[in-house]
Image (cartoon, helix red, strand yellow):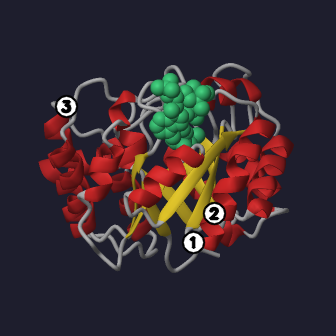
Amino acid sequence: SLPQSIKIVEVSPRDGLQNESQVIAVNDKVQLINDLRTAGVKHIEVTGFVSPKWVPQLADAQEVARQLAPDEDVVYSALTPNMKGFEAAMDSGIKEVAVFTAASETFNQKNINCSIEESFERFAPILEQAKQQNIKVRGYVSCVLGCPYEGDIDSEQVAAVSEKLFAMGCYEISLGDTIGVGTPLKAQRMFAQVAKRIPTNSLAVHFHDTYGQALANILACIQEGARIIDASVAGLGGCPYAPGASGNVSTEDVVYMLHGMDIKTGIDLDKLITAGQNISKVLGRSVNSKVANACRSS
Ligand code: HMG
Ligand code: MG
């Protein structure tokens, strides 16, 4: 049966902007975050405390974090690949972090310069510190339906990596179709495989729309029990270490679909569209969301 509500995790300030080569001012990033808040978005991944040599666009992580408007109703989270990133996030007042690894060895090497096993070793002190400081930690698994370097990925490997993160203390595991190659039945089977080991209310789905399959995959996973969806306003995004990866599924399209199915998100679609228009204007491009474009031209 369908749920009454779904949690949307907005990743545009991080996943959306990390791949941009043009300089985006801190003010514009903070404006995007505030526009999202105004639209009722409650979970916003605001930045990544990653190496500026690897991801130059997020070199301003501390600045962005410091300019966040205090808001008790909103959770601001940030990526932290290692203790250095975690400590910087804590210094900047961040209250929820995310660690990230992959179901593909090659992708993990290219993305965070270590093996999957080594990534767990890096995360262990983060999870320990986070527990002491009452900081929630999300865990990402990339390449759950395919890898740009290794091709097909076994769902059993996805389940094993997810289970390990969950056992280490991650409260939520986000399953990332990094390059958007998944199709609905494969997505469903993968989700079901992971759900054998982790309660579905701790699983998020993170689809990139590279092949136009994201909405279909999301619906397929909802039918399998998914209740947490990652999305990016205006379809912004891509991963610098996943050649050809395009944006995440656009939040406008997800919200329209869910509301049309009487599933609540707490988000005001019209204000969300405004948020997408504003950041797209900053980037000098048109909004990459069918729903946004349809609503504003009708
Ligand atoms: P490394 O080079 O192996 O790290 O990078 P290192 O420990 O050897 O340090 C090298 C240099 O980086 C040193 O500086 C460190 O201080 C510095 P130097 O002495 O040379 O001047 N450094 C840092 N600086 C700032 N913040 C840090 C940090 N750590 C080290 N936290 C590392 C390893 C993990 C740092 C690097 O590979 C990295 O930052 N990778 C990030 C890659 C990334 O952000 N990818 C995109 C996000 S993942 C994604 O998009 C997928 C997702 O959306 C889900 C999906 O779609 O599948 C989540
Ligand atoms: Mg992503």
Q: In this rendering, is residue 33 above or below 81?
A: below
**CA–CA distance between discs 3 and 2?**
41 Å
| Camera-side mark, 3 or 2 | 2
Image x and y of residue 270, in percent: 20, 63
| Camera-side mark, 3 or 1 | 1
Among the two numbered marks 3 and 2 on one chain, the one whose residue lies closer to the N terminus: 2
User: In the image, is 201 to the left or to the right of 46?
Assistant: right
User: In the image, is 213 to the left or to the right of 102?
Assistant: left
Secondary element type, mark 3: loop
Q: Is residue 217 visible?
A: no
Mark 2 lies within 8 Å of ligand 1 (Cβ measured): no
Image x and y of residue 290, in percent: 31, 44
Image x and y of residue 205, in percent: 59, 54
Q: Nearer the viewer, residue 242 or 137?
A: 137
Q: Disc 1 vs disc 2: Cβ atoms closer than 8 Å?
A: yes
Q: Please give the residue where the numbered disc 1 appears in the rendered image.
A: 133
Q: Please give the residue where the numbered disc 3 appears in the rendered image.
A: 285
Amino acid type for the residue under numbered disc 2: Gln
At x 34%, y 49%, the residue is 62
User: In the image, is 3 to the left or to the right of 162?
Assistant: left
At x 46%, y 67%, the residue is 95
Q: Please give the residue where the numbered disc 2 appears in the rendered image.
A: 129
Mark 1 lies within 8 Å of ligand 1 (Cβ measured): no
At x 66%, y 68%, the residue is 202
**CA–CA distance between discs 3 and 1?**
41 Å
Q: Nearer the viewer, residue 216 or 72?
A: 72
